[in-house]
Image (cartoon, rainbow, N blue to C red):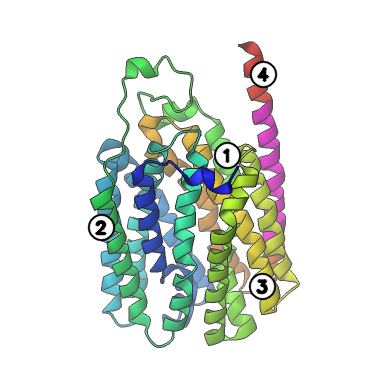
């Protein structure tokens, strides 16, 4: 069987969302260099930058709740497009302002709208797929993001020193184009259903009446899964917070920005070249097992930075943690979609994001404060032990899922 079989025969809309992801990610200039922008251009300390990144990430909580509600309550497509265009507008304003604390506040606004759009995007992907092709759908869109991302950070690294306004303009323009692709080519995806029929189903995707809380009580596995992922996110958050600082320490400010851009591009290239094959080899396993395996690759890839500081070995590290990222990104959405009621899909995605995102929010502020009095390489040792612990716990969770599944089959 060809590895490419998993990417055939999707609904037409999936391929246009794929194209939209590529366009948007080519212009992802601001995010990868956020830490350097705050410390080098705005003048914040590493601790202050850590607090800012944490506040930015924490905004996911209200943003995701609002975005999830709007997407389940109203038109998913126009919710996604409106919120994304507001994000682009925030970046455009940054391009025409002097470097001051106004810029970080506008970036917080952009982060809010970006986070609010995420539940709509995940829900639309789940709407357009089913259990038989869902992993392929999520991995294709993840692949599209990284095709663009393999180019964007390199451009951003070279624009950073002398053409900073173009970072914001380029990010905004590509975001707007990506929205136009969705508006023209993707219809509304929200499923239609009858509650009388749904109540007769035993599938975890069956629609539910009532609040998110009542639906979650019937699916407690979502909460357990999200809590484990919270600690995984804490460890992996150091890629975007500590790694650019580490590159600056090792190579200097200007060269460090370019090196970090190259590492991020390597990340994108590995995703483009390896995602299809990794999905082909791991699709036989349950999503929770693949997430446990992802954490092992994160542990090794990030942990080895404690011992190495050469560009070549940092490339090797990037390849390893990228494999973990591929496994994680292509299985998280599958697990959530397979265990979420179609009536609450966007809100379940936002709930998962809030819990797991807490780890991503805590990572920068805790490590930013830690770095004030400790060597930067110690962060990689901490990341290693946290990721290995998460892998073990997630594997135990997977074993429990398999046991529960076999037990339910025996009762039928």
**Foreground: 259 or 129?**
129
Q: Quadrant of residue 256?
A: bottom right
Question: What's the distance in space between the residues labelled 1 and 2, CA to CA?
Answer: 35 Å
State yes or no: residue 396 in magenta.
yes
Residue segment shown in magenta? 383-402
At 60% across and 65% down in the image, what residue appears?
367
Closer to viewer: mark 3 or mark 2 = 2
* Numbered circle sitting on residue 407: 4
* Numbered circle sitting on residue 314: 3
The quadrant in which the C terminus is found is top right
Question: What's the distance in space between the residues labelled 1 and 4, CA to CA?
Answer: 20 Å
Above or below, 240 relative to 406: below
Residue with the mark numbered 1: 225
Q: Main secondary structure of the magenta part?
A: helix
User: Residue 186 at what x, y percent from top left?
Assistant: 29, 46
Q: Sequence-wise, which precedes: disc 4 or disc 3?
A: 3
């Amino acid at each position: 069987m060809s590895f490419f079989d998993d990417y055939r025969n999707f609904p037409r809309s999936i391929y246009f969302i794929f194209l939209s992801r590529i366009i948007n990610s080519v212009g992802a200039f601001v995010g990868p260099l956020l830490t350097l922008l705050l410390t080098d251009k705005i003048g914040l300390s590493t601790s202050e930058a850590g607090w800012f990144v944490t506040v930015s990430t924490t905004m996911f909580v209200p943003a995701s709740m609002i975005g999830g509600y709007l997407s389940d309550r109203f038109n998913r497509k126009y919710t996604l497009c409106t919120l994304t265009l507001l994000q682009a507008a925030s970046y455009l304003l940054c391009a025409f302002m002097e470097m001051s604390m106004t810029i970080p506040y506008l970036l917080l606004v952009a982060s809010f709208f970006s986070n609010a759009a995420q539940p709509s995007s995940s829900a639309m992907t789940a709407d357009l797929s089913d259990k038989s092709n869902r992993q392929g759908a999520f991995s294709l869109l993840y692949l599209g993001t990284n095709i663009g991302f393999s180019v964007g950070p390199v451009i951003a690294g070279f624009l950073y020193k002398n053409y900073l306004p173009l970072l914001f303009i380029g990010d905004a323009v590509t975001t707007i184009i990506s929205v136009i692709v969705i508006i023209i080519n993707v219809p509304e995806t929200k499923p239609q259903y009858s509650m009388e029929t749904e109540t007769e189903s035993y599938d975890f995707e069956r629609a539910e009446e009532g609040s998110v809380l009542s639906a979650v009580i019937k699916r407690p596995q979502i909460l357990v899964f999200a809590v484990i992922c919270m600690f995984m996110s804490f460890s992996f958050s150091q890629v975007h917070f500590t790694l650019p600082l580490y590159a600056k320490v090792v190579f200097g400010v200007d060269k460090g920005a370019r090196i970090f851009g190259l590492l991020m591009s390597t990340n994108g290239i590995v995703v483009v070249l390896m995602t299809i094959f990794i999905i082909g080899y791991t699709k036989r396993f349950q999503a929770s097992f693949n997430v446990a395996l992802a954490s092992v690759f994160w542990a090794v890839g990030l942990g080895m930075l404690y011992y190495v500081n050469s560009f070549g070995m940092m490339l090797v590290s990037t390849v390893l943690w990228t494999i973990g990222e591929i496994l994680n990104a292509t299985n998280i959405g599958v697990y959530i979609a397979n265990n979420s009621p179609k009536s609450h899909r966007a809100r379940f995605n936002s709930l998962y994001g809030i819990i797991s995102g807490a780890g991503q929010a805590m990572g920068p502020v805790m490590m930013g404060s830690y770095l004030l009095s400790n060597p930067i390489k110690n962060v990689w040792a901490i990341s290693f032990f946290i990721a290995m612990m998460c892998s073990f716990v997630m594997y135990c969770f997977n074993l429990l899922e398999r046991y529960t599944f076999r037990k339910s089959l025996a009762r039928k």
